[in-house]
Amino acid sequence: MVKIFIGNLAAETTTDELRSLFSQYGKIAECDIVKNYGFVHMDNKAEAEEAIRNLHHYELNGQPMNVELSRGKSRGSTKLHVGNIACTNQELRAKFEEFGAVLECDIVKNYAFVHMERMEDAMEVINKLDNSAFKGELLGWAKLGGFLNKFFS
């Protein structure tokens, strides 16, 4: 799995547009946009490199995109979708770090994606914080891409 960073996205860019653009080069496993940047996960390294070569500085919705390999976390982590967020990125990261290493934490509107280094730590977060209030809101979550598909709220 190869994670690609896409920077300098126009505000109106959608995940469907990114997915469509990158899927011309290979299979897309995941596609997310956070503010003016995004991430595309491709299954094949050669296809990802081809996409980067062809789409770096490609103009989408009037903006030339910055497309490069992500220098972020490894794919061995556990990704949690956390709903009903009413806090800052730093506050959320600190709360999750009470349970283990957080590799990535991105808030999008009132939900977030938190990448925990170890699945055991992510499961402990879910077990300990299920139906608990944080910063005045009842947290909800689901582990993405795995065996836990129930969404708590």
Image (tube, grey):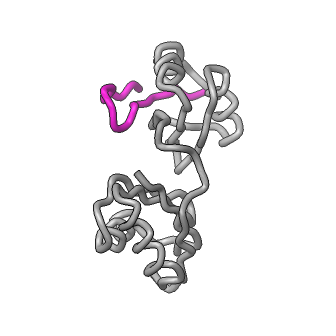
Say how many tags the image has.
0
Visible in this render: residue 115?
A: yes
Please state the horizontal and vertical placement of residue 89, each as a whole percent of the image.
Answer: 66, 42
Q: In which quadrant of the rendered image does the C terminus lie?
A: top left
Looking at the image, which is closer to me, 32 or 26?
26
Residue visible at 50% across and 86% down in the picture: 62
Please state the horizontal and vertical placement of residue 66, each as a whole percent of the image.
Answer: 57, 74
Visible in this render: residue 131?
A: no
Query: What is the span of residues highlighted in magenta in the rendered image?
Result: 136-153
Q: Quadrant of residue 133?
A: top right
Residue visible at 40% across and 51% down in the picture: 1
Please state the horizontal and vertical placement of residue 3, each as a whole percent of the image.
Answer: 47, 56
Query: From the viewer's perspective, is 49 left or right of 89?
Result: left
Q: Residue furthest top?
A: 128
Report the magenta stretch's main SS: loop
Q: Is residue 138 magenta?
A: yes
Q: Is residue 95 above or below residue 16?
A: above
